[in-house]
Amino acid sequence: MTDQHPTPQWYAPQGGTQTAPRPDGAHGSQAPHRSTPTTPIPRAPMGPVGPAGPSGPSGSGSPSPRPGRRRTAELTVVAVLAALLSSGGTIAAARLWDDTQTPSTASTSSTQLGRGTDQGPVTQADATNPNWAVTADAVAPSVVSITARLAQGEAAGSGVIIDGSGHVLTNNHVVAGAQQLTVTLSDGRTFEATVQGTDPSTDLAVVTVTNAPGDLTPIALGDSDSLEVGDPVMAVGNPLGLAGTVTTGIVSALNRPVTTQSESSGDPFQQSQSDPVVTNAIQTSAAINPGNSGGALVNGSGQLVGINSSIASLGSSSSSQSGNIGIGFAIPVNEAKSIAQQLIEKGTAEHAYLGVTPQDGTASDGSATRTGAEITSVGSGTPAEQAGLQAGDLITEVNGEAVDSALSLVAHIREQAVGNTVKLTIIRNGQTIEVDAVLSARSQNG
């Protein structure tokens, strides 16, 4: 077995400052935070990292791949940080990235995602104690392994079949930099695939199976808004190249703001390429490991509730761990299916825009001090201005969900669709008020 190449150190300076990206994609104000330094994961003989997984030889003289991609006979590691920030528990996580992404195809076909019904394929006698064997059997045909041929070898991740036309939903970082893609079904059949569309700002992508067979099994789509902390869930994917692996756990937290480095698209005109990915993520205790990226997080009924995308690990020098330590994150399916539909139809996705510059802040509502996202400026002609927001307002809730930091606000806005009306709870001059804002599409020029 060949040792992996160590990855250069990733770190977040202790006691440094953090720039919170604006919900409209412009630069935000700096918000102080504390974070834990990350260090490379120790060497291991075989297995992927990421989560995006394995495969592919590499020569001894080839440069070390960037964090997170695993290659056959070579394991590339990434230090994945779970840093609790003082700005309200925002978590920084890391996945896999490369420098370029495969161009999308020109297909503009419209499709009905899922199985055409909200009902899951499994009826559990006890929803609190699911028969996971039945769920795994029902879901397995809908989850695939994705292998990406890169300039320096191969990498692998997971994907989810979302319709009968051969469209597979996965993470952008699974396919970025791919020169060739193959998709392997649960029964072992392998097909070539092309990138239908990518959205680096949400870390989502859709690939299309070439000459897709007529017996594909699309996954049943659930409702991530109906999840509750403590609900049982199952992760299905391709960790460490072990296709068809299932792990179970619970929903550990909801609306967890998670930041990861945005995958570069290689397109200098794509504004979002320099923005971090900010996800209002589902946190789960179901074991998620390198190679699970793009795979399914399902409930006991076999409905997709999230796309597994990142993991957290301790960042304590040489003792830091690779792989699962009980904290994994998934992109909620309600956000993922909206992006997927756009990628299938147009190859790109629009993003909701509020038009404020936020920073972490506090304000008194007369009886207590609350944390939230303090508005430092409001853009002219933006949804925020039209809603009457003002500099100095502290946003504490979006649609009744708590906002306790600038990044939390960004995460809430990014999961919304263009045209949605959001109810913002704000504190202004010691008084709590509510305003409605109609989100518009973010301008390509910022």
Image: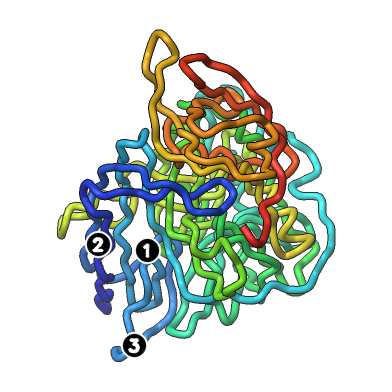
Query: x and y percent of residue 29 in the render?
Result: 42, 46
Is residue 138 something that shows in the picture?
Answer: no
Give amino acid for label 1. Val
Mark 1 and mark 3: Cα distance apart in space: 18 Å
Give amino acid for label 3. Ser
* Vertical comparison of 236 with 134: above or below: below
Query: Label 3 near label 2: C-beta < 8 Å?
Result: no
Dot 3: what SS? loop
Residue 62: numbered disc: 3
Q: Earlier in the sequence, mark 2 or mark 1?
A: 2
Which is nearer the eye, 444 or 167?
A: 444
**Which of the image's four quarters has the C terminus?**
bottom right
Identified at 38% across, 26% down, the residue is 362
Residue under pointer 2: 41
Dot 2: what SS? loop
Is residue 72 something that shows in the picture?
Answer: yes
Q: Residues within 10 Å of mark 2 (few under 14, many from 20)?
A: many
Query: Label 1 near label 2: C-beta < 8 Å?
Result: yes
Residue under pointer 1: 49
Q: Earlier in the sequence, mark 2 or mark 3?
A: 2
**With 2 as the anchor, is 228 left or right in this view?**
right
Give amino acid for label 2. Ile
Which is nearer the eye, 295 or 125?
A: 295
Quarter of image, res 193? bottom right
Mark 2 and mark 1: Cα distance apart in space: 10 Å
**With 110 as the anchor, is 92 left or right in this view?**
left
Dot 1: what SS? loop
